[in-house]
Image (tube, helix red, strand yellow):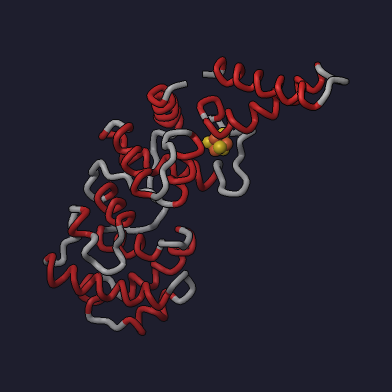
Amino acid sequence: MNKQERYEKVLTYFKNNVPIAETELNYSDPYQLLVAVILSAQCTDKRVNMVTPALFEAFPTIETLANSSSDEVFTYIKSISYPNNKAKHLVGMAKMLLNDFGGIVPGDIDELQKMPGVGRKTANVIASVVYDKPAMAVDTHVFRVSARLGLTMGAKNPLQAEQQLVKNIPQKLIPIAHHWLILHGRYTCLARNPQCVTCKLQEFCKYFEQNFLKQKVSTNIKVKLQGYGKKTLKKAVKKSTKKAGKKGG
Ligand code: SF4
């Protein structure tokens, strides 16, 4: 299966089976989403959702957050990862948002990244979710799932993965494709224990092809060549795996 076919199959599967895919962070406006995404760095959405109701009640507007201190903010977010840094970032972000952007969350990736605590991933999430721009935020799930599926090849960092994905996914699908890949990584293609046996994408997945197919071929050949030497067996497995891989596309 070539790269273009793989993209087509994967995207078609998601389009048909996951027509709605959204962020699992709770928010009600761009300010709240920006705060939640900053908090979600190296932390689960579930945990972020546990702290944001009280946080948003205490700091309901950009102004209230900008006029607070990081010590005050810390008390609301101390149960999530890196609370000290994130508290400082949130106050700094709110100040800049107020002073430099008139209190409006910008949609431009470069402008977003000027704010404390806002890296490329966070900026892409805001551009994509709030402004529906074709921006692909690559987090750990997107990075892993797209590499396993074979949508990205040899990407050494999130930026390289982002560039490959954006190049190959139709623009209008990029915002939802980000959520498709995240959700697939969160619930099926788990980091340590991918659920390949029940995964509906196994037919189009490079990782599956390389791991499970080889295992299956190896078992079949071993049964057929019982009594032959190790060398013969190894050669036969290699040859048949190659053949099966071609057949499977
Ligand atoms: S087959 Fe396995 S590796 Fe491939 S996408 Fe599914 S869970 Fe992930």
Q: Quadrant of residue 174?
A: top left
In the foreground, 78 or 158 = 158
Query: Residue 115: where, in percent of width, then height?
Result: 23, 66
Q: Looking at the image, which residue is at 34% across and 58% down?
A: 27
Q: Quadrant of residue 226?
A: top right
Q: Looking at the image, which residue is at 35% across and 76% down?
A: 87
104 is higher (above) or lower (below) than 71:
above
Lateral position of residue 4 relative to residue 44, left or right: left
| Count of marks overlaid on the render | 0
116 is higher (above) or lower (below) than 223:
below
In the foreground, 74 or 246 = 246
Q: Looking at the image, which residue is at 43% across and 22% down?
A: 2
Query: Residue 35: where, in percent of width, then height?
Result: 32, 65
Q: Quadrant of residue 68?
A: bottom left
Lateral position of residue 128 relative to residue 10, left or right: left
In the foreground, 205 or 174 = 205
In the foreground, 45 or 138 = 138
Q: Residue furthest right?
A: 227
183 is higher (above) or lower (below) than 112:
above
Q: Looking at the image, which residue is at 80% across and 27% down?
A: 230
Query: Residue 170: where, in percent of width, then height?
Result: 29, 31
Query: Residue 80: where, in percent of width, then height?
Result: 47, 70
Lateral position of residue 188 relative to residue 55, left or right: right
Q: Quadrant of ligand 1?
A: top right
Lateral position of residue 115 relative to residue 80, left or right: left
93 is higher (above) or lower (below) than 185:
below
